[in-house]
Image: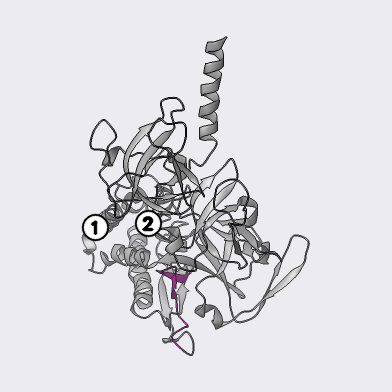
Amino acid sequence: MLHIFIGLSLLFISIVGYAIPTVGSCLLHNFKPVMTDKHGTLDTNQGVWVLRHDAPVYPTFDASHSSSTQAFGEYLLPLKVAKHPYSGVQRVQVRKLGTDTPLGWMEGYDLLCRIKPLESDKGLARKVFVKTPSSHLPVYPAYKGSCNGNCEQLSRFELYFIFAEDKIYQRYLILKAHRLKDKPFSSFASKPMGWVKYEHTIPWDTILGLRPKADNIWAYTEDKASVEIVGGNIWYTYSIRIPILDIKPNYYQVAGPGGVFYIPIDAEKVQEDVWMTANQLADWLALLKAFEKPLPVQKQRAAFVYRLRKQIQDLIGSYPPSDIVLSEWLAKQGKQVLAIREDSPLLQYSLDEIGRKIEDCEVSLLVNWVTEIRKVLQKVSNDSRQKVAFRAKYPTSSISCPLSEKGKKVPESLEFEPSAPLGSDDNYRYDHSIYGKTVYWLPVEFLP
């Protein structure tokens, strides 16, 4: 009977231990790449952050009673890692910056073990908007429990990145940062951060946003209430767009202060823009630069496939297979290196289709498209304050080339309008700084 009780007790300890943050915490983090011996000694300059207020610190890796506590958001350096002999939960020995003396051991689930946001299945940084009702919303200093007077309050509809998640207590750790640096959370001046409840957030799992064009537009709630949204060039001064959550046959599902709204699809009134970092813009330009030099007419097809495959491999780090549509393959790589439009004229093909199945004249159409669309991105990169406007001319039935259905979606040429400023001063631009990183908002038609 005693053996049964002990067994159940250990099982209970293990269950309790894992009913806490695993996503983003050090609980299941793999320290082996920086482990120097079989005793778990670590050799790393990368620190960890305390995930809750009054997190216990134990004198030894197997101690049952804590000797001190650490405050939420403190930045510590890991020294050693070991598993508790009974619960099996990973513990980490830590010290403070500027000292050589260990503080003690902390539970892995009480420490943040990442410097970048969590990623979605598509490789996108996970992010949320916090709802803003009439009263302020609390940001908790722990993944469970109440405020006890220690909560900051949020009152604005703003973008946050998710760095950890507790699926049991249903809270996200949110931060106003693309990347964490070696300092405590508290030293991030005027940047509220902490744990928020799922119910107080609107997850934004796309990189798409809406920009009203010249006229004001209307957004609607499920109960048919309406909100008017200002239109016009003023949107070029904003660092964010109306976040698109989903696209249905006749409307966009978007996020707004207080909840989810619906906006009718109307290309005359709204523009779909794509969020693209400066690095992603540079990656597209680098990929397309390979096609600047004229391709030999006799070997155009083989040369195009070779350059396209090589550029993608250089960016992604793996070899794209020949028989899978490139956009589908890129979406499955688990990291969003390139910003991709859903109806990409270039990436709608597989390498096998380009290399063997479409006509030579369709390959020539693709080569011309790649050259033309690079001019668009280069104009943006050269001066983001200048408007880039063009009209895409598509092949007509009179063309002599027997195009595939995909080929009919590839523009034959781009007719550029004269360059003009986006607005009256330098605040009108395609690029803006969001939490210290340059982000471009570009019409989806600007992507290859």
- Per the image, is 212 magenta? no
Secondary structure beneath label 1: helix
Q: Which label sits on residue 173?
A: none
- Residue sticking out furthest to the front: 67
- Per the image, is 440 magenta? yes
| The quarter of the displayed image where residue 233 is located | bottom right
Question: Mark 1, mark 2: which one is toward the viewer?
Answer: 2
How far across and down, in percent of the image, does residue 161 sit? 49, 58
Q: Residue at x 51, y 59 (%)?
A: 193
| Towards the viewer: 353 or 40 | 40
- In the image, the segment drawn in magenta is 425-442
Mark closer to the chain start, 1 or 2: 1
How far across and down, in percent of the image, does residue 191 sit? 49, 65
Examine the rendering and report whether any part of residue 396 can be seen: no
Disc 1 target residue: 303
Relative to 35, residue 230 above or below: below
Examine the rendering and report whether any part of residue 136 can be seen: yes
Residue 314 located left or right of residue 71: left
| Towards the viewer: 195 or 278 | 195
Residue 420 located left or right of residue 13: left
Q: How many marks?
A: 2
